[in-house]
Image (cartoon, helix red, strand yellow):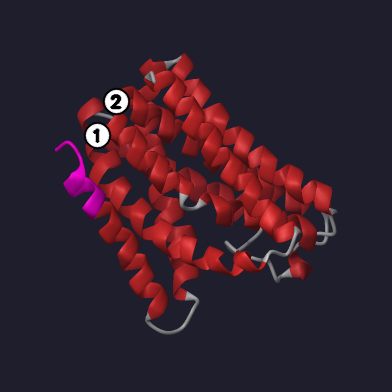
Amino acid sequence: MSSLWLSLTLGAAAGLADYLGGLLLVRRSPSARALRYFVAVGAGFMLGAAVLEMVPEGLTLNPKWAPLLILAGYCGVHLLEHTLVPHFHFGEETHHHEFLSAKTSYSVLLGLAAHTFFDGIAIGSGFVISHWLGWVIFVAVFLHKLPEGFTVASVMLASGRGRGAALNSAMILGAMTLAGVLVINIRPGWVREGLPLSAGVTIYVAATDLVPEVNREPGIRMALIFFAGVAVFFLLRLLGPF
């Protein structure tokens, strides 16, 4: 399979995971409890992939501007999530008083949609460079997609939106992921900017969005699962082509 079709297929798979996360919430599936483990594993794997694969590749592709673009990706998501978007957690939202209006819940959707677009940019950029990097980034993205879809659907329900709106919001996140993959495949030359920007976004999502969720649970179990995510990344790297 060509890099184009492989990246589009995996982008669609990542987007579908967003929708499945929303579906788990709407149907109140008992398996939704396991999502916190996806958060912990995903945070560890994403951090390893961003720091040891995406950042070095970005610096190689664009040594002059990559550091600034990485910082811009990180700061851009921080600005979006802490100015335009109300506070939210990855998982089931319990702060119902913060999401009384459609405006605030759709602000959360906007914030999540922005970083899911860069999830797609990251996957597409990886496959422009190599199948290895594309697969690594896909796994990193996929691991946080179920909790992401679960989160946006939960915010919608907490704001008084119906189940249809909750599922549609998860579907929008999936569509934005695929849109990001399409953009890079249409304009592969943008990988010089897209990869370092998405590296900054990935570091933000892993270290600032996901790790605090891991730290909310007392005890050592979730910390060990986080480190297991890092270990899985290192194992995959050892088995890789380098």
Q: Which of marks 1 and 2 precedes in the sequence?
A: 1
Q: Which quadrant is the C terminus positioned in?
A: top left
x and y percentages locating residue 176 in the rendered image: 60, 34
Q: Secondary structure at mark 1?
A: helix
The image quarter containing residue 124 is top left
Q: Main secondary structure of the magenta part?
A: helix
The amino acid on which the numbered mark 1 sits, given as a three-letter code, is Glu
Q: Residues within 10 Å of mark 2 (few under 14, many from 20)?
A: some
Pointer 1 local density, CA inside 10 Å: few below 14, some 14–19, many at least 20: many
In the depicted view, which residue is nearer to us: 76 or 164?
164
Q: Position of residue 179 (x, y in %)?
A: 57, 27
Name the element at disc 2.
Answer: helix
Q: Quadrant of residue 113?
A: top right
Q: Residue drawn 62% across and 64% down? A: 32
Residue at 39%, 17% (x, y): give it: 188
| Number of marks drawn | 2
**Residue nearer the viewer, 151 or 22:** 22
Query: Does residue 184 show up?
Result: yes
Q: Which residues are magenta?
A: 235-242
Please give the label number shown on residue 129.
2
Q: Going by the picture, which residue comes out furthest to the bottom?
A: 219
Marks 2/1 in contact by CB < 8 Å: the verdict is yes
Task: Give the residue displayed 26% in from the left and 60% down from the top.
Answer: 231
Q: Is residue 232 left or right of residue 211?
A: left
* Residue 223 covered by magenta stretch: no
Label of residue 57 in the image = 1
- Distance from label 2 to label 1 (Cα)? 9 Å
> Height in image: 219 above or below 92?
below
Q: Quadrant of residue 172?
A: top right
Q: Amino acid at mark 2?
A: Ile
Q: Residue at x 35, y 37 (%)?
A: 135
Q: Is residue 72 visible?
A: no
